Amino acid sequence: MPLTLSCNVNNNLAGVMDNDIYLDSVGNISVSTSIEAILENCAQAAKTRLGEEVLHTDQGIPYFTTVFIGVPNLEQTQAAFRAAWLAVAGVIEVISLVLTQQDNTLLYSAIIRTTEGIGELNAGI
């Protein structure tokens, strides 16, 4: 069963900054299991820039060649997101992925099928 430290990946917890770990109702570090853990790993994969990981410089999203350019190439970015998510343990398929640009923010909405069920991610980069 997948297990991670919980983090506020969809920015839906009041009083917890986006992507921060937090304490549960009894004051312990919150731990995610099952589909929550897989989706949190997917959210982290989407935030990882290509070359950011010291020992795995070939992993990550190539933001500097797809997004942080004059006109973002959403098709290449979408392909990179799908590849990153399919590399996450427990992910079976990316059912849908919609990328949009609002002002200077790239937003994504994804539905992902995992070994633990189907889940949704919504975030901005």
Image: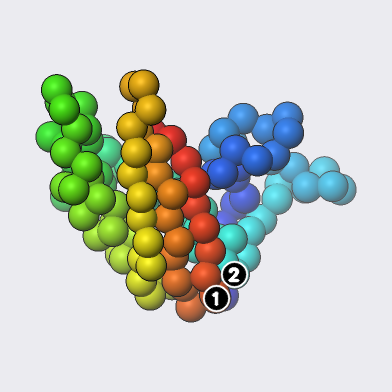
Q: Is residue 20 left or right of residue 113?
A: right
Query: Would you name the residue on which mark 2 appears?
Result: 34
- Decide: few, some or many residues near mark 1? Use Cα within 10 Å; few <14, some 14-19, many ≥20: some
Question: Where in the figure is residue 54, as x and y percent of width and height?
Answer: 25, 41
Q: Quadrant of residue 107?
A: top left
Q: Secondary structure at mark 2?
A: helix
Residue 40 is marked as none
Residue 67 in the figure: left or right of residue 123: left
The residue under the point 54% across, 38% down is 19
Q: Amino acid at mark 2?
A: Ser
Residue 50 visible from this viewpoint: no
How many numbered circles are shown?
A: 2
Q: How is the image coloured?
A: rainbow
Q: Could you tell me if residue 96 is visible in this image? A: yes
Q: Write the residue at 25% across / 60% down.
A: 83
Instruction: Check disc 1 and report the residue beneath it.
Output: 116
Q: Which amino acid type corresponds to the residue marked 1 in the rendered image?
A: Glu
Residue 74: image x %, image y %? 22, 42
